[in-house]
Amino acid sequence: MSFALACASTLSGVVHAQQSKPSEYQVKAAYLYNFSRFVEWPAAERGEPFAICVLGKDPFGTILDATVSGQGTGTQNLVAKRVTKPQDALACQILFVGNSEEDHLKEILAVLGKASVLTVSDIPRFSERGGMIEFLLKGDRVRFEVNLSNAVNAGLSVSSDLLKVALAVRKNPQSGA
Amino acid sequence: MATGQKGSISRKLTRMNMLVSATALLLACIGFVAYDLSTFQATLVRNLSIQAQVAGSNSVSALTFDDPVAAERTLSAFRLAPNIVSACIYRPDGKAFATYQRDSSARIPSRPQIAPGDEESHWGEHDDLMLVHTIVFQGQSAGYVFIQSDEQTLIERMKHYFTIALAVLVLSLIVALFLSHVARRSIAEPVVQLAEVARTVSRGKNYAIRAIPGKEEGELAVLVATFNEMLEQIEEQDRSLRTAHDELERRVEQRTGELAAANKELESFSYSVSHDLRSPLRSIDGFSQALMDDYGEKLDTAANEHMKRIRSATQKMGLLIDDLLNLSKVTRSPMQREPVNLSDMARSTATELAKRDGQRSVEWVIEQNVQAHGDSRLLQIVLDNLLGNAWKYTSKHQSARIEFGLKRQNGSSAYFIKDDGAGFDPEYSARLFGAFQRLHGAAEFPGTGIGLATVQRIVLRHGGKVWAEGAVEKGATFYFTL
């Protein structure tokens, strides 16, 4: 039942956390997909599927696949992938960094460099440590912070609508100019 | 008075201007408002739709990432639109997500009233306009926006129109006032001046005045020029008329003088002639008398008879001269008008006549208290003559009846003396009042033929009229007015 509701929510691009009480990761999976609608990537090669990847220990299980299945942004196919090496993540558009990778965060981000990969994670202070979007829990609501500088450095353009609903929008002082 | 006259035409012009501009403006306003109101509903819906779309697209991310606070922040912008009573963002499943209420009385439908698949719908409710718009994001329905707008907008708009219309009305009336002021200078002013000149001319009869021509051309200039021309003609005619009048007056005066002199001459001539004729006549009569007295016995009967005839002729001539003198006296003596009782006068004359010949049987009918206003001496002569005539011309009848009175007819009245004596042929009635004119022979009735002429002269001097009616042997009636 709750699974069907989550599906219905993601279909319309919204998750109603309070109302139908979906699980935290159901909400997060929906958000991962929804981010793709408010962020623009540099022109992707045709035929390439739009990949939402998970690095490290996967907290979603089948939820992410269920959310992603059948969703396509325009002509592109949407796929959910599990990657084990940061290098593999270079082919992804959105990368969820699992909690297990907290210690290797620096190396992962260094590997990604300026690649146009939207990095998302639950890791505390992720947005301050070089990541782009950091999930937070405010009460029982899933919120997020955005580090705009990191996204811009990666060649991503984040919609102001997304920034409007972010808990915080950070900018790195050194990369401000 | 002049200013009142002056005011009337310029006031009319001003009123006309005002009326025209006010009417045109009102009609224009009515047309404009009617047009605007006819399209206003559509405009209102369109505006509301745009507002709904803006609010909706601004709420997409809030809906997507379940942030009602952000959505409410978006809706709170409606605070700047006082006509928005309430607004609400619904989730795609129809649950309210974020609301905005202008005040606590604002109500929000629990679910968006829109058919699935419709992009937008609107309806009216208690003068309020409701609109629901589907939020579409990247081809998918992201939720709904509901907006309720009240009639305040309409009222505001009407107030706005009214204010603007009033302002324009006042402004254009001021302009019209100014224009009419200008028009007054060019139209009313010359007319007013012309009227003023016309009035001055009419009042003072001074035709030398001229209207000052204005700077304008056209009808007004023609009017002024024609008016001046007419004045010139009138002045010319007035002058010649005056000259003719003066000439005539002078001539009449001259003729009157001449006539008066001639009349006086004639009168004094006839008086002196009458007077001078008397003394030789008195000699003839006196010496005839003396001849008869002293030598009557020595003369034979035939001579005595001749002497008698001489004496009777001289006496008759004496009477003639007396009458002539009377006639001239009547003309010469000044008149003194006073109230006169003609009845008393007639009665005394009748008594006098009756005493002269006691043998006659005459019935006198004299109306009581007939009053007149005139010269008593002259009126006595009139009554003496007319009553004397009546007495005389009834003398051939066995018995007679003589009447005196006042006859009233057709609102006017005339005195009359009526007898049933010899009368006269009405064919000759015109000759009755001529001097020395007699219709009867002296042998039949004695007389000089001056009496009625004297009567006529006296009546004429009183400003009256005398006339007679009668027939042969049917009596005569003499009427006179004073």
Image (cartoon, rainbow, N blue to C red):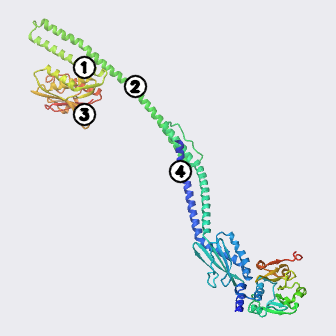
Say few, some or many: other residues with alpha carbon within 10 Å of mark 1 (under 14 / 14 to 19 / 20 or more): many
Give me the disc on residue B12: 4
Q: Quadrant of residue A54?
A: bottom right
Give the alpha-carbon distance from disc 2 to disc 3, as whole Å. 39 Å
Asked if residue B15 is positioned above or below residue B347 in the image, the reply reads: below
Which of the two labelled residues, at mark 2 and mark 3, occupies the earlier sequence position?
Answer: 2
Q: Chain of mark 4?
A: B
Which is in the foreground here, disc 2 or disc 3?
3
Which is in the foreground here, disc 4 or disc 2?
4
Asked if residue B20 is positioned above or below residue A148 in the image, the reply reads: above
Say few, some or many: other residues with alpha carbon within 10 Å of mark 4 (under 14 / 14 to 19 / 20 or more): some
The residue that disc 2 covers is: B254
Under circle 1, the secondary element is: helix
| Nearer to the camera, B411 or A174 | A174
Q: Position of residue A162 (x, y in %)?
A: 77, 80
Which of the two labelled residues, at mark 3 and mark 1, occupies the earlier sequence position?
Answer: 1
Q: Position of residue B294 (x, y in %)?
A: 13, 5
Which of the two labelled residues, at mark 2 and mark 1, occupies the earlier sequence position?
Answer: 2
Say few, some or many: other residues with alpha carbon within 10 Å of mark 2 (under 14 / 14 to 19 / 20 or more): few
What residue occupies the far front of the structure in this picture?
A139
In the displayed structure image, the side of residue B311 where residue B138 appears, left or right: right
The residue that disc 1 covers is: B324
Give the alpha-carbon distance from disc 4 to disc 3, as whole Å. 60 Å
Circles 2 and 3 on the same subunit: yes
- Tell me if label 3 and label 1 are in contact, CB under 8 Å: no
